[in-house]
Amino acid sequence: MEGRVGAISAAVEPLEGPLPSGVGPGRPAMALPPGLLEALPQAILAFDAQERLTFVNPAFASLFPFMAAAARPGAALQEILRHGVAQGQFPEAGTRPETQLAWLAQELAAHRNPGPPREVALAGGGWVEMQEHRGPDGQLICLRSDITRRRMAEDRAQRHAEEDPLTGLGNREALFRKLGELPHGRRGRDPRSACLLLFDLDDFKATNANLGHAAGDALLVEIARRGRALLRGGDVFARLGGDEFAILLHGIGTPAQAMSFIGRLRVRLEQPLTLGAAIITPSLSLGVALFPEDGEAACALFRGAETALYQAKRQGRHGHSFFDRSIAAMLDRKARLTQDLRAAIAAEEITIALQPQLRTRDGRHLGFEALARWPSAAHPVPPSEFIPVAEEMGLIIPLSRLVLRRALEAMRSFDRLGLDPGRIAVNVATEQLLSEDFPREVRAALQQHGLPPERLEIELTETTLLDRSADRIVQVLREFDAMGVSIALDDFGTGYASLAHLTQFPVHRLKIDRRLVRSIESGDSASLIARTVIGLAHGLGLEAVAEGVETPAQWDYLRRLGCDVVQGFLPGAPFDVAGAAAHLSAGLVAPTE
């Protein structure tokens, strides 16, 4: 039969590995039933020690139609493979001579030094599994199995696992797989480049809240539909979750090229659309990282784009930012600070400082404000650094709980010493006021330390009054008011709260922001605002408290304006608990003239 050479027994030696039934270790081909190898669906080839073809079965022509003509008696292995490459039998070999030669050398090495089975793509979308065995006398047996159906099933499963069910885009897994396929170690004249762009939709939460989640989903689907039209073959568009998307662009390696695409993206995605009865105009915030300058590894490049997106959102909505290593360093510090702060709270390493509050007209002690302190082992971390991190990273509630407990413990210790500390003020976060359990937690803490509610004051910032959940906050504050806990509004005069807000919320004290007090002697608008706040407080039956008092002139000016209470470095710098006890033992503290 044409295409087969000599007796099969001369070519097929005892084989190792998963070859067809009837061909295995210790079983020579002479024992096989006549015609069995010709009938097998797997392609089988045999080569002598000089790599000349001695046997090929009919299945080879079915699996490798572009190279069947070269599989003639006596044909060299290298020539058969070279013919297949030239005819386009192996897409992975490419079309450039240098890539074809490299593929051919790699394939010959696999034949000459047989290893585990390997999978090779064929022209037309087919796949084969290739396996070789070389006998002691140098003869080579090659088995080729059609695995196209299996690969297609695996590809379908992978696509399903890597597809976002809402938009049909790729998901995070699909994106990272493609990022992992970017060529590493690119140097010299290799012009290939890529750009990773992350974006999310400004005010998407408001869309969900105002129009419903069905409208939000419709918006995401439309964003996906519009964005697909801008992509080329090989580009990747993925939804990472929520309203965050990623686009991987090949061949874009400069900021100018990226900006050109961003412009087209905005034009297409930021067109108005109708959602139910509403018409909205999407707005994007974008972060960009370039490959390989901003990271060669998938995780590094993605992190660079995340960092850029974070910076863009810090600058305001509808912005964009490119990766900047200085920003990355800042975020690294924040991440380390967050980890350390979480550990410090868990280990109860956070302490408090107590700043006195004195009556303005005579300097009599009225109470303390408890201030969080972090005496880190390396060096103390200032509140201006760790408080914002706690607020941003979801640590403000456990931090505030610890500060409250420390404050109540200090009050109890003063009582045991026979000292009168007055009332102690602690700062509370908006997140705490939104918790239904917060008043009960505070009541239980007071009872545990044997303190009446009148000994406690909670401070909230002016911006809390403007929260969207103001109705819930009002309810919680009324519970505290009914309990007997005093309520102070901190940093008043620098925000946007109106008289209507003050009449709605149960507040007992207005605290004038230290920035206004600092400029009070200049006679400018700050002085006028301070006078207005004091008059407003008294008009509503509230006390006025001035923060940041540092000079006798400030104290005297506030006294003449009728300010009720002062605190700051002149009345008394923040003490530790022992220092606060000594302060109380000293009695009155009045300013020096």
Image (cartoon, rainbow, N blue to C red):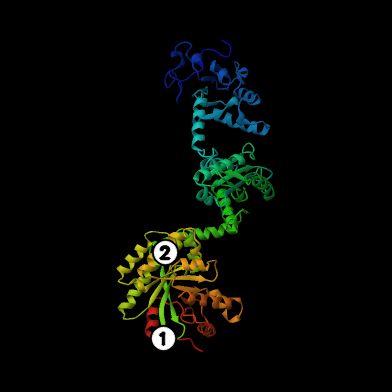
Compare residues 161 and 403 and report the one nearer the observer. 403
Quarter of the picture containing the N terminus is top right
What residue does disc 1 label? Answer: 588
Q: CA distance from mark 2 to mark 1?
A: 32 Å
Residue lying furthest bottom: 593
- What amino acid does circle 1 point to? Leu
Q: Residue at x 48, y 33 (%)?
A: 157
- Residue 66 percent coordinates (x, y): 62, 21
Mark 1 neighbour class, 10 Å CA radius: few under 14, some 14 to 19, many 20 or more: few
- What amino acid does circle 2 point to? Leu
**Mark 2 against mark 1, which lies toward the viewer?**
1
- Residue 137 percent coordinates (x, y): 51, 22
Q: Choose top left, top right, bottom left or bottom right for residue 127.
A: top right
Dot 1: element: loop
Q: Which mark is residue 408?
A: none
Mark 2 neighbour class, 10 Å CA radius: few under 14, some 14 to 19, many 20 or more: many
Q: Is residue 523 above or below residue 508?
A: below
Compare residues 197 and 460 and report the one nearer the observer. 460
Compare residues 26 and 159 and report the one nearer the observer. 159
Dot 2: element: helix
- Residue 593 percent coordinates (x, y): 51, 89
Q: Is residue 417 left or right of residue 305?
A: left
Marks 2/1 in contact by CB < 8 Å: the verdict is no
Please report whichever mark, 2 or 1, sits nearer to the chain's N-terminal start.
2
What residue does disc 2 label? Answer: 399
Q: Residue at x 41, y 80 (%)?
A: 366
Q: Is residue 195 above or below residue 344?
A: above
Kindly tell me whether residue 215 is visible in this rendering. yes
Q: Residue at x 54, y 76 (%)?
A: 532
